[in-house]
Image (tube, rainbow, N blue to C red):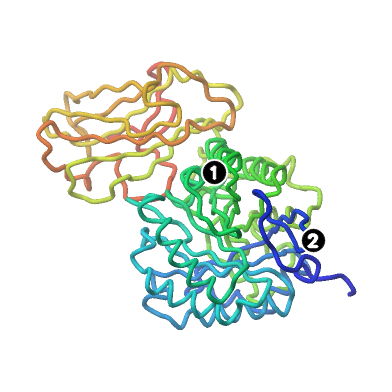
Amino acid sequence: AGTKTPVAKNGQLSIKGTQLVNRDGKAVQLKGISSHGLQWYGEFANKDSLKWLRDDWGITVFRAAMYTADGGYIDNPSVKNKVKEAVEAAEELGIYVIIDWHILNDGNPNQNKEKAKEFFKEMSSLYGNTPNVIYEIANEPNGDVNWKRDIKPYAEEVISVIRKNDPDNIIIVGTGTWSQDVNDAADDQLKDANVMYALHFYAGTHGQFLRDKANYALSKGAPVFVTEWGTSDASGNGGVFLGQSREWLNYLDSKTISWVNWNLSDKQESSSALKPGASKTGGWRLSDLSASGTFVRENILGTKDSTEDIPETPAKDKPTQENGIPVQYRAGDGSMNSNQIRPQLQIKNNGNTTVDLKDVTARYWYNAKNKGQNVDCDYAQLGCGNMTHKFVTLHKPKQGADTYLELGFKNGTLAPGASTGNIQLRLHNGDWSNYAQSGDYSFFKSNTFETTEKITLYDQGNLIWGTEPN
């Protein structure tokens, strides 16, 4: 109705300093939503739904998430036809579109590098002269992957393939630890003038420590684009953390950082924008939107956030997640037989009062089988030097545990809403023999932070979170 589309208004995007800018050199902040994996929920990515998202939600960008593993492009190259459909729909509708090479379980981008080059050669030859296309060449590098050795060389090769066909569209490069380590990329940047670095967050898991990394990257002149974020925790499920999401979006607005929310699907999980059974072609009433979808739509439209005073609703199966002090955990090493146990945890203060960390201890319960135990702190946002630890052998073994590692803090406080950030530990037997982790009480296989009640927390020795083994 006479109003210009986002692409008609802004045209060719480029980078000026750390800022994404339009054809006139004015700062642009794109806001939009990502598909779920196109091999699973591709039917939501079509011209009708994108038109509805543009007109009713006000999106300026859509991300087509093409998984590489998990039944995606590597096993089923025809999934690229869904990407083409989304790109061509976005082109007709005048919105920007991100072509996302969605590595996840294939954590090292070099694993499928030749396939990536083949894919981006085709995409850039088809769409290289279209100003609305943005390439995201490695969704979430993770595992034993680092910027200098793995990601940067991969990016240089893939970028050179794209640039043969497309000299100037924006290219976004994922960073280590599921696209959190923008600080590493900032210290060793790519030479291409129109490259940005991906930062991903899930509001229930990642807080100020990750904003600090973003600030560091910007201070080094590295442009940041949040190509994926969720209102949930990092599993994509569990809680809709609107207070923390609001804090993040205020931060991104203050820095004019573009963002894309995960995800457009009706999957039964809290990060999905739609309720199960919602139409696949748009036309959604507010009653069709999940709590997350409602919040995201309002924040794209820029309307007054009507959820301001509504207390956050925790997921039904985790009634304690939104109050108290939960522990979140991921397995640094998910193998069942290994000579090291590598728990990673963070402690979050969801209460209303500041917590004195020197009164707080956490216990990781496992089987040491009477062997001498050693622990190393590989990384702690609060500083490994601030951590204390001791091993306690149980007089009477419990189910899944004959020992616990007790962690403590020498000093520090945790304000309401704050997190300790990541604490990465490494345990090994004195004789370096293998552990069989599978039966350990506190262990479960998760490569994203998840709230767990099997790592217990104490305040001055009194249990305040979790369940001890029987």
Report whether residue 160 is seen: yes
Q: Quadrant of residue 442?
A: top left
Residue nearest the observer in this picture, 192 or 4: 192
Q: Position of residue 441 (x, y in %)?
A: 27, 40
Q: Residues within 10 Å of mark 1 (few under 14, many from 20)?
A: many
| Neighbourhood count class around disc 2 (C-alpha, 10 Å): few under 14, some 14–19, many 20 upward | few
Q: Reply above or below: 91 against 33.
A: below
Q: Which residue is mark 1?
A: 204
Res. 24 mark: 2
Name the image quarter holding the C terminus.
Answer: top left
Q: Earlier in the sequence, mark 1 or mark 2?
A: 2
Instruction: From the top left corner, tell me how far across and down residue 186 is, in percent.
Output: 52, 45
Identify which residue is drawn at 32% across, 30% down: 377
Say what amino acid the circle numbered 1 marks. Answer: Gly
Q: Nearer the viewer, mark 1 or mark 2?
A: 2
Task: Point out which mark residue 96 bears.
Answer: none
Question: What residue is drawn where x is 33% and y is 34%?
Answer: 378
Q: Report the side of 388 relative to 54 (left or right).
A: left
In screen coordinates, is 179 left or right of 303? left
